[in-house]
């Protein structure tokens, strides 16, 4: 399954519904208009995600929960921009983290620490040695071509943020993951982060329901949005890290399940297997979201649910 082909035009397409959505959100948060007034106006919009969010009124989504949910969605919806120095720096940080994890494997990776390797040396004929190092490292962790930036078209900037979060907070697990050369850390990260955001409606792409069906996924119910928003409220100031940690637990499960079921004679089918396990991880995430109460720890409950699934056989 090629995620890039389906999602790239959706991420790049501009639509008037996004402007309507932003207008309604700002009016709701800044001017504190009544929920019922906003709902009546939102129902005239054709954007499913927008209507779904306003229908959460039935589950008494508070103003604060609504604000946190939409802040998280907005913060996770930036495309990767190679002209943004902060984006380029994070890409450099990611390669530095990966280089440190692989330094015992390849001595040449030590030379990749030269300044501006990511931002200026890719496809630069005057820096062939550095280009070779970048390309070698990029392919090693699962990028699909010479320029790593192009792989973020589907997952956006948040997929790079997640990869860097995982490389920073789960070094031991990542070192084990990188030993399995048939498992693509990058592609799995991008697919997982995109699909989980899609399921939770934490994305601004259009035609969400159509895209969910394409990947054989089901989106959050209104009740699940309410429950998830309650846990965002508990985290309050660390919602992105909270979401990335939940992603991390799903990612660790995907790798463990993949290794457990790896057929050495069918390694060329590894992407099909990874995509199947990714959907299983997301199903576990949805199950937890549907059954957790406000006082329970989301991360702990997700870990236990994934551990239970690991003990089962597909």
Image: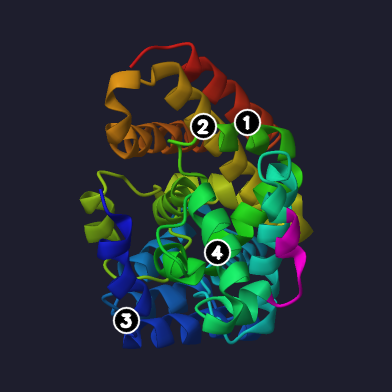
Q: How many marks?
A: 4
Callout 4–callout 1 Cβ contact below 8 Å: no
Callout 4–callout 3 Cβ contact below 8 Å: no
Of helix, strand and loop, which one carries label 3? loop
User: Quick check: 303 left or right of 144?
Assistant: right
Question: Residue 94: image x %, image y %?
Answer: 67, 59
Task: Of the two numbered discs 4 and 3 on the same chain, state the one appearing first in sequence.
Answer: 3
Badge 1 crowding class, 10 Å Cα cut-off, few under 14, some 14 to 19, many 20 or more, is: few
Task: Of the two numbered discs 2 and 4 on the same chain, state the one appearing first in sequence.
Answer: 4
Pick whichever, 268 or 289, lies toward us: 268
Callout 2–callout 1 Cβ contact below 8 Å: yes
Vertical arrangement, residue 220 with respect to residue 174, above or below: below
Tell me the distance, in whole angstroms, between the alpha carbons under discs 1 and 3: 38 Å
Callout 2–callout 4 Cβ contact below 8 Å: no
Circle nearer the viewer, 4 or 1: 4
Q: Which residue is mark 2?
A: 180
Question: Residue 5: image x %, image y %?
Answer: 26, 63
Tell me if I can see residue 190 in this picture: yes
* Mark number displayed over residue 13: 3
**Residue displayed at 52% across by 75% down:** 80
Q: Which residue is mark 4?
A: 132
Callout 1–callout 3 Cβ contact below 8 Å: no
Tell me the distance, in whole angstroms, between the alpha carbons under discs 3 and 2: 36 Å
Q: Tell me which corner region of the image, top left, top right, bottom left or bottom right, holds residue 110.
A: bottom right
Q: Which residue is mark 1?
A: 176
Tell me the distance, in whole angstroms, between the alpha carbons under discs 4 and 3: 34 Å
Callout 3–callout 2 Cβ contact below 8 Å: no
Image: magenta residue range: 110-116
Quick one: quadrant of the C terminus? Answer: top left
Task: Of the two numbered discs 1 and 3 on the same chain, state the one appearing first in sequence.
Answer: 3
Vertical arrangement, residue 149 with respect to residue 100, above or below: below
């Amino acid at each position: 399954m090629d995620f890039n082909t389906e999602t790239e035009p959706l991420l790049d397409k501009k639509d008037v519904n996004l402007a309507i959505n932003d207008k309604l959100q700002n009016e709701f948060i800044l001017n504190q208009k009544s929920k019922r007034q906003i709902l009546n106006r939102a129902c005239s919009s054709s954007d499913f995600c927008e209507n779904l969010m306003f229908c959460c009124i039935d589950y008494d989504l508070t103003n604060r929960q609504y604000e946190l949910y939409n802040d998280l969605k907005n913060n996770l919806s930036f495309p990767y921009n190679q002209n943004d120095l902060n984006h380029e720096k994070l890409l450099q940080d990611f390669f530095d983290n990966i280089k440190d994890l692989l330094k015992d494997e390849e001595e040449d990776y030590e030379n990749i620490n030269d300044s501006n390797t990511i931002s200026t040396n890719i496809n630069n004929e005057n820096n062939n040695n550095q280009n070779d190092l970048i390309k070698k490292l990029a392919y090693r962790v699962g990028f699909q071509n010479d320029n790593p930036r192009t792989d973020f078209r589907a997952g956006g900037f948040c997929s790079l943020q997640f990869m860097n979060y995982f490389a920073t907070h789960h070094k031991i697990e990542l070192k084990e993951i990188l030993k399995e050369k048939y498992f693509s850390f990058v592609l799995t990260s991008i697919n997982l982060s995109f699909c989980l955001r899609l399921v939770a409606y934490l994305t601004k792409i259009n035609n969400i329901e159509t895209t969910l069906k394409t990947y054989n996924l089901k989106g959050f119910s209104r009740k699940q949005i309410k429950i998830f928003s309650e846990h965002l409220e508990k985290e309050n100031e660390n919602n992105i890290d909270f979401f990335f940690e939940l992603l991390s637990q799903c990612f660790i499960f995907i790798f463990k399940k993949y290794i457990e079921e790896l057929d050495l004679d069918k390694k060329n089918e590894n992407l099909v297997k990874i995509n199947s396990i990714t959907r299983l991880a997301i199903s576990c995430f949805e199950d937890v979201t549907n059954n957790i109460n406000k006082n329970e720890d989301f991360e702990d409950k997700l870990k236990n649910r994934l551990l239970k699934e690991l003990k089962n056989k597909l």
